[in-house]
Image (spheres, rainbow, N blue to C red):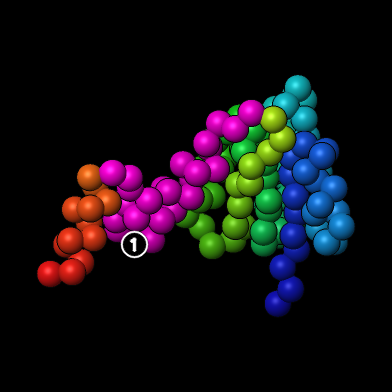
Amino acid sequence: MEAKIAAFGEKDIMLIFKAIGADVYQIDRSDNMEYAEGKLRQLIKEGYGIIFMTETIAEKMDSIVRQYSNRVSPSIVIIPGPGERNNYAVRQLRSAIIRAVGADVMAEGDNKKDRSNRWQK
């Protein structure tokens, strides 16, 4: 089965996905988010298997992204976008890892030391 791939976000980043043959949908931070949400829901209904989305746009559509975060399809992959980073992509990745393995493997500092000692016993 062949999965359709879409990229959803700011123009500068979308050019990369266009080069690899993904269906590209340019949405800017200043665009109407109701339009963007409708477009995302349309892509999902059309059976896209993978949807890449910049974090600035994904954060504005957080409720939809979370709605599909536990589903196999579509796989919504959050990528860093142009400009200021807001760590939304990292938070989503961390949440997915915690759900998958039951532990925060991205923990920093003392939590990381405690976790590594627990596995060595």
**Looking at the figure, which quarter contains the N terminus?**
bottom right
Question: Is residue 112 left or right of 52 when viewed as pictured?
Answer: left
Tally the numbered discs. Answer: 1
**Dividing the picture into quarters, in which one does residue 21 lie?**
bottom right
Residue located 28% across and 44% down the image = 109
Whether the magenta-drawn stretch holds residue 90 is answered as yes
Q: Can residue 81 be seen in this view?
A: yes
84 or 56: nearer the eye?
Answer: 84
Judge whether 55 appears above or below 113 on screen. above
Viewer-nearest residue: 19 or 110: 110
Say which residue appears at 44% left-offset and 53% top-offset: 96
The quarter holding residue 6 reads bottom right
Could you tell me which quadrant the C terminus lies in?
bottom left
Hey, what amino acid is under mark 1? Val
Residue drawn 60% across the image and 47% down it: 78
The local crowd at label 1, few if under 14, some if 14 to 19, many if 20 or more residues have their Cα within 10 Å, is few
Residue 64 image position (x, y, % from top left): 57, 40
Instruction: Find the residue positioned furthest to the bottom.
Output: 1
Assess whether residue 72 is covered by the magenta stretch: no
Relative to 9, say whether 28 is above or below: above
Q: Where is residue 51 in the image (x, y as percent from the top left)?
A: 68, 53
In this picture, which residue range is highlighted in magenta? Answer: 84-109
Q: Mark 1 points at which residue?
A: 101
Q: In this view, does 17 lie to the left or right of 52?
A: right
